[in-house]
Image: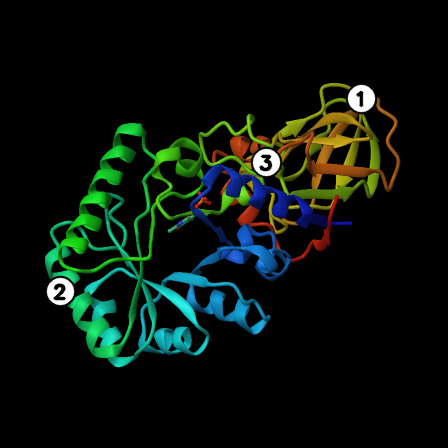
Amino acid sequence: MREIRINLDRIRENYEVLRRVARPAKVMAVVKADGYGHGALQVAKSLDHDVDYFGVADISEAVKLREAGIKAPIMAWIFNSLEDLELAKQHQIEVGISSFHHLQLLNQVDQLQLHLKVDTGLSRNGFTVNDLPEAIEGFMQVIESNKHFAKGIFTHLSNTNENEDNSQFEVFETAIEYARGKGVEFELAHASASNATLSYPSKHYDMVRCGIALYGLSPDGRDVSGLPLEPAMSVYSEVINIKRVPAQTGVSYDFRYRTEKETTLVLVPFGYADGIPRAAEGLKVIINGQKFTQVGRVAMDQFVVDVGDSEIAIGDRVEIISDENPVSQISTRAGTINYEIVTKMGSRPNRIYGGD
Ligand SMILES: Cc1ncc(COP(=O)(O)O)c(C=O)c1O
């Protein structure tokens, strides 16, 4: 009745496309936030035999992957405690080091693989250029005294525009040179997420970190139509009630929609608790190959579609997200980005994993 289908073949194929784009750089498959709502474990298992790296935000996300038997290198970049670092050591999770607090914690644990985060302009975590002298000194000290390993140096872009991105790359390269001057050589430099991977072929460095493109979706504002990336998530429901109603019939909470003339309303069990934002009111759905408009408030569990005089039967399949009805039509209506729609799909719909 409420169904989210994940095509793992497409995710594997998208990974190969990104590999071809990034070559010779490695490609980190970013599977944080439950694989952008696609199921981190399932996605990681289907890629694990031939992936360069997995990336997650939290250590707990990485631990779940290890506990599920994932063998590939995993990097996590958001944490705050010594317990997190102890878990990272226990489960061989590489960590992003992005604050002086992190450097202090590194004195209390040993033998971790570290990626130094440079804040090149995003103003989130990471060491700024001004921090660098003290940060590199502290970094060298913990490496020596606690047998950590300088695995990588990385940054993250704001994707504001080409000028801003280039300034960030410049700062990043200055930081790499500065560290090198101090005798710290990193095995992997990495800066580009999906958008920059596709936009700046000369800035792949040693690795790129791709999330949204792995799932076949376009990074905000970037046209990927020239690339064979294919969306891996599709979302379906079915018609469970049909009503012929007269003109001026109010529909759903607040009567934000009233029928203009006699028409047929169908009820679809998929609501905002399942992942269709209330703000997406007016979204399109496809029933029997025909596009219709959802009308009135999207409720927690259901929404209504005005199908006019079309012949629709109970049990007919409703395409909410599919190749013909992309996620972008929902995100645009809701005034958000495709990332937010897929990561917020609810836990109630049945998730079905398959291939082509
Ligand atoms: C540090 C970092 N790298 C890479 C990514 C992947 O970004 P995208 O999904 O745009 O490829 C993210 C996601 O937010 C991130 O936080």
Label located before the other in sequence (2 or 1): 2
Q: Nearer the viewer, residue 13 or 317?
A: 13
Mark 1 lies on a secondary structure that is loop
205 horizontally vs 135: left or right: right
Q: Residue 44: tell me if it is visible.
A: no
Q: Residue at x 71, y 54 (%)?
A: 353
Task: Say how the picture is coloured.
Answer: rainbow
Judged by depth in the image, the label closer to the viewer, 2 or 1, is 2
Q: Dot 3 lies on which element? A: loop
Q: Which label number is shown at residue 177?
A: none
- Relative side of 270 to 345, left or right: right
Camera sees residue 102 = yes
Closer-to-camera residue (113/258): 113
Q: CA distance from mark 2 to mark 1?
A: 75 Å
Mark 1 highlights which residue?
Answer: 262
Residue type highlighted by circle 3: Leu
Could you tell me the amino acid type at mark 1? Glu
**Residue hosting label 2:** 137
As drawn, 4 above or below 225: below
Q: Nearer the viewer, residue 275 or 7?
A: 7
Q: Position of residue 166 (x, y in %)?
A: 26, 33
Q: Quadrant of the C terminus?
A: top right
Q: Amino acid at mark 2?
A: Glu
Q: Tell me where residue 276 appears, x and y as whole percent.
A: 60, 43
Tag 2 secondary structure: helix
